[in-house]
Image: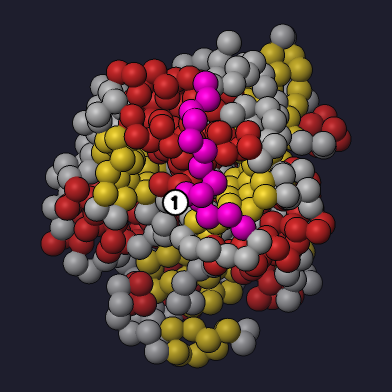
Amino acid sequence: MTNLVTDVASTVDKNPEATAIAYDGQELSYEAFWSRTGKFAAGLDAAGIDPGDRVGIYLPNLPQYVVAFHGALRAGAVVVPMNPQYKSREIGHLLSDSGAELVVTLADLVPVVESVREETAVETVVSVGGDADGSIAFEEFLGESEPSVVERADDDVACQPYTSGTTGQPKGVLLTHRNLASNARMAADLAPDGTGVGDRSIGVLPLFHIYGMTVTMNAALFSGAAYYPLPEWDAQTALSLIENEELTIMQGVPAMFNDLVNQPNADEFDLSTLRFVNSGGSSLPIEVLRRFEERFGFPLYEGYGLTETSPVTHFNMPDARRVGSIGHTLDGVDAMIVDTDFEPVERVSEGPVDEGETDLDAITGELVVAGPNVMKGYHDRPAANEEVFTEQDGQRWFHTGDIGYWDEDDFFYIVDREKHMIVTGGYNVYPREVEELLFEHPDVADAAVVGIPDERRGETVKAFVVPASAASGGSSGEGTESDGVPTPDADVTEDEIREFCLERLAEYKHPREVAFVDELPRTTTGKVQKFELRGHEDGATGEESEEVAE
């Protein structure tokens, strides 16, 4: 029988005095952390929360988040993580769809919960950071006793995060104790010699996101490492924390590493204690990887996963790494690249291929995965479950929606998400290929490519570019306007960007339109919100956010 928190309890028994959580100059030992999870579980029992009931956590990265998460699991409840940037409409859907009966949130966010409370099953609101009408303060909510862990089966749901595609309401992802525990163990083994006591991990990834939850928080707590949460991403704060606390592990998303590269004073910080740095959440541009390694002098590894897979399925291990690849599958995880008939696509001899010289349609297919980390299913979405799973040869395969290829050395490569592909004049264009090229331009700090309507071609390619001068804190005055959107002064012109791409890509792939912007719209996990960029063309605002983890 598996219960995610019993593994944490084992860590507590082995390392009671080790630091579990460090925040704002204060440290919480494993023994003290475990005591607080028990008291939170007692508070849940007093509030009438039974095993299987949903508990919403609507907080930034704070010690109370970690306590509430594992305290809820200790009580046998199911955690519903919620982005603290969400507004009433968004959390209203998550709370009503999940049936959550209790919510833990910041005092400042209690009014947001109160505004939708009548539409939901919420009966109790617990506030962090102050008193708020309609809530009970976190410290007052904690009970005095410390009940034992409620037993839960391997396939009992432990967590219900929400994810969405480009349309429709977000879907609840049912992740079991087995899903999360197996993947936390896998994640803890990714670092050379594994994660262990003495490691100090920076918590820059939001805990409402499966990447931060599993790969940073739970991997640390499974291993006796110390977890250093940051409530919000700030490159300077992160650099200072790494240096001052001599942190050893950093998990981040490509946008964070691009931010670090573009900090003018990054060289002033001593990051020599970092022994393992990993990028996930979305595709890592090769040029960002190159610049990062050149500037900081240590390797930046890349992995792959999705919310539905708890999340990690692939990783470039230190002894088996191929730049441009998402790596090999983790132990216990199976994967294939399949065509529309669910037949395996023929492998290339060795990747990565030159995407500019290769007929990608001939070698690519959809990535499907199977393993102990694959979700139980979507909450109350039978039609969606039927669509995303294929049963074959005794395995239950999950369709990721990502297009890629594989090679004879078992490395996998992602070209793009299927929904992002641009069809222009009958030709397929994968935005990531164009974005990778744009990152190679010396005057480009960030870039995203989308398809926009075109009467003759159906769609055409448009690039949104953040000039290096803007990203490095240089000229930020407004320049010309592009489709009514003010753009920063840039050291490069639209024509130069187009010519740069034309010289290196097939003619139909080059961006026919280029817009300079101060920054790209991103989610809190660093993923570009391409629907907002497309909205500059047609005013569309009805699409949902991108998948939380690609």
> In the image, 66: left or right of 443?
right
Q: Position of residue 113 (x, y in %)?
A: 67, 60
> In the image, 314: left or right of 203?
right
Classify 10 Å Cα crowding around label 1: few (below 14), some (14-19), many (20 and above): many
Which quadrant would the N terminus be assigned to in this image?
Answer: top right
In the rendered image, the vertical position of residue 13 relative to residue 471, given as above or below: above
For the question of whether residue 533 can be seen, the reply is: yes
| Type of amino acid under label 1 | Asn
| Residue at the (25%, 29%) spot, across then down | 17
Q: Position of residue 250 (x, y in %)?
A: 32, 43
| Residue at the (69%, 30%) spot, across then down | 50
| Residue at the (81%, 59%) spot, across then down | 118
Viewer-side residue, 11 vs 135: 135
Q: Position of residue 413 (x, y in %)?
A: 50, 35
How is the rendered protein coloured? secondary structure
Viewer-side residue, 413 vs 15: 15
Residue 72 magenta-highlighted: no
